[in-house]
Image (tube, rainbow, N blue to C red):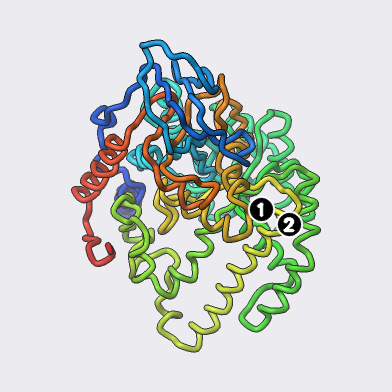
């Protein structure tokens, strides 16, 4: 009897300890900035004499006036006559583009991130590991809260077996299903709860995978996310899965089909990929499968693995949620010594480090080769960053992603489409992602033209989110308030990592 109570007691204590660590790591303990301190105006607006990005993102329409009323774009034209009730914003010499969309983020419990997205001109996000909290935040946004629009996918659906399956499920990680009936019932339940999409894990056997995708098609809810190696590319094309979460899903599967990448066969693998990337892209295009990018994060892997102390100084670390940055006793964070990608054992062994670098540099190159094939064959690429994964700071990471996409070979117009029009189409949100009358007023006013240089998306002068106008002062206040809230909540000082 005593032993049973002892086991029971130890169980409870461990559960409480792990829960508190998960909570700390999720960012739940960080001070929340009260959005009501941020001043916005939602009176009828007229942005005059501005250059507006065309719907297809190919050119700027100069000398235009854009009217905004009741959260919507009312009219766009030259020589509009204005009545007095409009608050006028002089757009002379400035550029108006649609609000940006990050199609792959992880909000966790980090609510300040919503403001961080707005401060960076990101007016829509897709949460790729959703829970009830995110469904509530989506509702709040729909009801007028100061927030980007939120698309919420479910947590990852998997088919793992054994004890880890239960542990992962208890602590809110992926959820595994062992029978086809249970998997189908889960899809119906998620649809009923109001999720926008079903997210697939990398750990799915072909039977459960096909059952989930098939049931989702019946329920008219898209299946998106990872591609299990057990399923493979050949089964993907006609499965009904409509999106891949990262270019990485394709690359990993080509590595598997090649027979595995290691430091000895890097050249042979890249040759294999070059020979096969066109055929893969053609099949993705034929089956209308969208690919979210996440190139910047992959490019950061070798930097995080081998040179984290310097790399971390290049990111705006002060804005990232301290809970996530610091990690916890069993969940790694971002900082040197406790970073999810860092492997100090390998790094400190010159021979192993050399081999590992060869592997990771090839890994990065493979992503660039595959991305170029996707562009060439007009596969719909949407910009997604995996924000809140180590070193991807919400909002800021999208601008880095745009630059990486450009370097991978997309024109500036293609990059802008990937983060606006195409991303909105993928989210099945016809009201955002373009500047057109009748659309939701989600826009960014820039000081420089992003068609000339994609880095100009960072020259933000003002943001309009759902019709709410945030001027430069309000945007700066968001950043300052989040920095202060984070500093109050820190357990580990980050001064050595700030440049
Ligand atoms: Zn992710």
- The answer to whether mark 1 and mark 2 are in CB contact below 8 A is yes
- x and y percent of residue 41 in the render? 33, 23
Dot 1 surroundings within 10 Å: few (below 14), some, or many (20 or more)?
Answer: many
Circle 2 — which element?
helix
The residue depicted at 70 percent of the width and 73 percent of the height is 270
Q: Which residue is mark 1?
A: 227
- 114 left or right, relative to 224: left
Q: Nearer the viewer, residue 448 or 107?
A: 448
- Determine if the C-beta at disc 1 is less than 8 A from ligand 1: no
Dot 2 surroundings within 10 Å: few (below 14), some, or many (20 or more)?
Answer: some
Q: Nearer the viewer, residue 197 or 484?
A: 484
Circle 1 — which element?
loop
Q: Which residue is mark 2?
A: 232
- x and y percent of residue 453 in the render? 51, 52
User: Which quarter of the rendering shows the C terminus?
Assistant: bottom left
- x and y percent of residue 99 in the render? 48, 36
Kindly indicate the quadrant of the structure image that contains residue 445: top left
Residue 149 drawn above or below residue 382: above
The residue depicted at 35 percent of the width and 53 percent of the height is 324
């Amino acid at each position: 009897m005593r032993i049973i109570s002892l086991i029971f007691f130890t169980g409870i204590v461990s559960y409480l300890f792990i829960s508190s660590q998960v909570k700390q790591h999720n960012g739940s303990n960080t001070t929340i900035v009260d959005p009501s301190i941020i001043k916005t105006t939602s009176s009828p607006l007229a942005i005059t004499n501005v250059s507006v990005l065309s719907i297809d993102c190919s050119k700027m329409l100069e000398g235009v006036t854009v009217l905004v009323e009741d959260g919507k774009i009312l009219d766009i034209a030259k020589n509009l006559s204005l009545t007095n009730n409009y608050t006028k914003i002089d757009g002379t010499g400035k550029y108006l583009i649609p609000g940006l969309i990050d199609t792959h983020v992880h909000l966790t419990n980090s609510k300040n991130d919503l403001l961080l997205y707005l401060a960076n001109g990101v007016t829509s996000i897709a949460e790729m590991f959703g829970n009830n909290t995110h469904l509530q935040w989506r509702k709040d946004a729909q009801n007028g809260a100061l927030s980007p629009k939120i698309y919420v996918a479910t947590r990852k659906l998997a088919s793992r077996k054994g004890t880890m399956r239960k542990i992962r499920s208890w602590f809110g990680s992926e959820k595994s299903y062992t029978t086809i009936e249970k998997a189908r019932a889960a899809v119906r339940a998620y649809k009923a709860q109001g999720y926008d999409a079903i997210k697939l894990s990398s750990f799915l056997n072909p039977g459960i995978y096909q059952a989930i995708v098939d049931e989702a098609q019946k329920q008219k809810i898209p299946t998106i996310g990872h591609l299990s190696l057990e399923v493979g590319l050949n089964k993907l094309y006609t499965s009904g899965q409509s999106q891949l979460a990262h270019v990485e899903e394709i690359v990993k599967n080509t590595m598997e089909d090649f027979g595995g990448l290691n430091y000895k066969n890097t050249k042979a693998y890249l040759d294999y990929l070059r020979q096969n990337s066109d055929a893969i892209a053609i099949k993705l295009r034929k089956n209308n499968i969208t690919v979210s990018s996440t190139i910047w994060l992959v490019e950061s892997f070798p930097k995080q693995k081998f040179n984290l102390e310097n790399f971390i100084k290049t990111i705006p670390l002060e804005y990232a949620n301290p809970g996530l940055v610091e990690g916890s006793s069993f969940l790694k964070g971002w900082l040197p010594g406790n970073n999810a990608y860092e492997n100090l054992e390998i790094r400190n062994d010159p021979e192993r480090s050399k081999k590992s670098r060869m592997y990771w540099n090839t890994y990065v190159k493979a992503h660039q080769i595959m991305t170029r094939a996707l562009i060439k064959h007009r596969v719909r690429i949407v910009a997604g960053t995996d924000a809140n994964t180590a070193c991807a700071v919400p909002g800021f990471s999208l601008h880095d992603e745009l630059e990486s996409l450009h370097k991978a070979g997309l024109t500036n117009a293609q990059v802008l489409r990937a983060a606006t029009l195409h991303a909105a189409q993928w989210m099945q949100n016809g009201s955002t992602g373009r500047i057109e009358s009748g659309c939701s007023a989600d826009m960014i006013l820039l000081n420089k033209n992003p068609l000339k240089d994609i880095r100009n998306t960072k020259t933000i002068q003002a943001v309009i989110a759902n019709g709410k106008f945030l001027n430069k002062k309000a945007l700066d206040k968001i950043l300052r308030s989040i920095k202060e809230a984070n500093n109050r909540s820190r357990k580990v000082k980050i001064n050595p990592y700030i440049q």
